[in-house]
Structures are given as structure tokens and as C-alpha cells.
Amino acid sequence: MTNENNPNLTEVIREIHDGVAREMYCKGIDDFVKKICEKYTEEESNGNYRFYTVEIKQSIADLSEQLKAGGKNE
């Protein structure tokens, strides 16, 4: 059976592909945010700690949710 004979199969495959792509995109954003937050709470070589404030971390998390929802950055 070819896709030409079954247009529903083509649509199902497209939906599956789009769903997987969306999940990968969202996971990539989550991984990036996690790494950013980890990086800025690590100890520097001189013994000092670098960190973002809670407000900045929340801002980063909010922006990531906007990206995952398809919204624009403000």
C-alpha cells in the first residue's frame, strides 16, 4: 500500500513526526535552561560562587515556557 492510496497514513505519519520533533525541541530547551542554571551556581576556581538570583532564574524558566508554547520573547 502506498501513501497515494492512503492519505490518512500520510497524515498520521506527519502528526507522529511533528509530535516527536516538538518533544525534542522542548527537551532541548529544558536541558539548556538546566545547564544555564547549573553553570551559574558553580564554584569558580578562586572559591567564589557565581549565581543568578531567584528572580533571574524564574525569568529564564518563564522565557523557556514561552518558547515551548511557541510564543515570542518580550
Image (cartoon, helix red, strand yellow):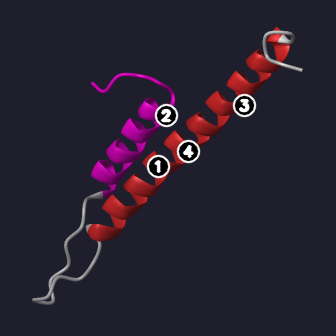
Q: Is label 4 or label 3 in front?
A: 3
**Mark 3 or mark 2, earlier in chain:** 3
Q: Nearer the viewer, residue 24 or 43?
A: 24
Q: Which residue is mark 2?
A: 68
Q: Nearer the viewer, residue 19 or 60?
A: 19
- The CA span between labels 1 and 2 is 10 Å
Q: Decide if residue 55 is on the left or right side of residue 1.
A: left
* Residue 55 covered by magenta stretch: yes
Snapshot quadrant of residue 53: bottom left
Instruction: Identify residue type, mark 1.
Output: Gly
Q: Which residue is mark 3?
A: 16
- The CA span between labels 4 and 1 is 6 Å
In the image, what residue occupies the spot 60% across and 41% down? Answer: 23
**Mark 1: secondary structure:** helix
- The CA span between labels 4 and 3 is 12 Å
Q: Nearer the viewer, residue 20 or 32?
A: 20
Q: Dot 4, how many residues are within 10 Å of its Cα: few (below 14), some (14-19), or many (20+)?
A: few
- Residue 15 in percent (x, y) is at 71, 24
Q: Which residue is mark 1?
A: 28
In the image, what residue occupies the spot 44% across and 46% down? Answer: 29
Q: Which residue is mark 4?
A: 24
